[in-house]
Amino acid sequence: MIKPIQTEQEYKQAMSRLDEIFDAKRGSKQGDELEVLAMLIENYESEHFAIDSLPANNYAFPKNTK
């Protein structure tokens, strides 16, 4: 049963299943499962592993000293 991923254990299980069905054909039963599972994993990762973006002016670029 596919449901939202709420724990790290569920995340690990989802990643393992994704690895098992990674080469599934699009439109097949496993292909549909792969597509939904990938969306659930992406959602979990965006909530738990989010990287804050920095404004462009926070990056240091070497200045031309010539």
Image (cartoon, helix red, strand yellow):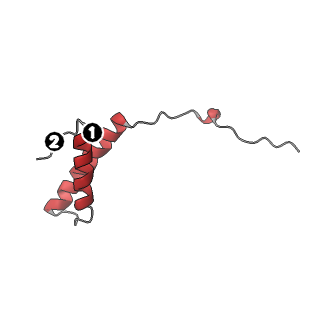
The front one of 50 and 32 is 50
Residue type marked 1: Glu
In the displayed orientation, state which residue is furthest to the right: 66
Q: Which residue is mark 2?
A: 3
In this rendering, would 60 be left or right of 35? right
Secondary structure under tag 2 reads loop
Q: x%, y% of residue 64?
A: 82, 43
In this rendering, would 23 be left or right of 49? left
Q: Which residue is mark 1?
A: 8
Q: x%, y% of residue 44?
A: 30, 39
The front one of 17 and 66 is 17
At 35% from the left edge and 35% from the top edge, which residue is drawn?
Answer: 48
**Which mark is nearer the camera, 2 or 1?**
1
Q: Is residue 24 above or below residue 44?
A: below
Residue 66: quadrant of the picture: top right
Residue 42: quadrant of the picture: top left
In this rendering, would 49 be left or right of 39? right
Q: Residues within 10 Å of mark 1 (few under 14, many from 20)?
A: few
> Along the polypeptide, which appears first: circle 2 or circle 1?
2
Q: x%, y% of residue 17?
A: 22, 55
In the displayed orientation, state which residue is furthest to the left: 1
At 22% from the left edge and 42% from the top edge, which residue is drawn?
Answer: 10
Residue 47: quadrant of the picture: top left
Secondary structure under tag 1 reads helix
Residue type marked 2: Lys
Q: Is residue 37 above or below residue 20?
A: above
At 18% from the left edge and 63% from the top edge, which residue is drawn?
Answer: 27
At 55% from the left edge and 33% from the top edge, which residue is drawn?
Answer: 54
The front one of 44 and 9 is 9
